[in-house]
Amino acid sequence: MARILLVEDNDMNRDMLSRRLQRKGHEVLLAADGMQAILMAESDVPDLILLDMSLPVIDGWEAARRLKASPATAKVPIVALTAHAMAGDREKALAAGCDDYDTKPVDFLQLTAKIDAILKRALG
């Protein structure tokens, strides 16, 4: 399956999502803040990034902009994961460079359908 970088600062969310993604057959890399996510993505380019938007050090909005600006990671699809579900937040995430957007609490079936569709497009 795919290598997914999960960027989540909440230990419980990170643990739950990573275990469920691993059970689906994905290799999961973990980062707890935006700067760590950028460094990990550039050194070990994943197939997809699940990016929390409310992160310490560098927030997800800025991390997405930097990842899309870097030649090493510009083509890696990013799915924003956020509790920000206000009008305009989806558009804000897409404008920052995210390829899709999903809200928390995560509906795992919906999220994995998005992941599968994005990976199918990205990986062929």
Image: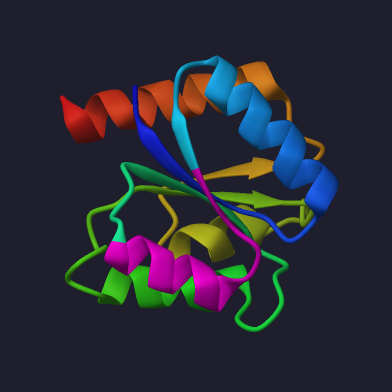
Dominant SS type (magenta)? helix
**Residue 57, position as x, y percentages in the image:** 65, 83
In depth, the one of 99 and 8 nearer the eye is 8
Residue beneath the point at 63% across and 76% down: 59
16 over 88 or under it: above or below: above
Is residue 38 located in the magenta-colored stretch of the structure?
yes
Q: Can residue 9 be seen in the rendering of this structure?
A: yes
Quadrant of the drawing holding the N terminus: top left
List the single residue furthest toward the bottom: 57
**Residue 78, position as x, y percentages in the image:** 43, 51
- Judged left or right of residue 95, residue 50 is right
Residue beneath the point at 56% across and 65% down: 92
100 over 111 or under it: above or below: below
Marks counted in the figure total 0
Colour mapping: rainbow
Residue beneath the point at 36% across and 69% down: 67
- Judged left or right of residue 26, residue 68 is left
25 over 50 or under it: above or below: above
**Residue 104, position as x, y percentages in the image:** 78, 42
Is residue 52 located in the magenta-colored stretch of the structure?
no
Q: Identify the magenta region.
A: 29-43
Residue beneath the point at 41% across and 74% down: 65
In depth, the one of 44 and 70 nearer the eye is 44
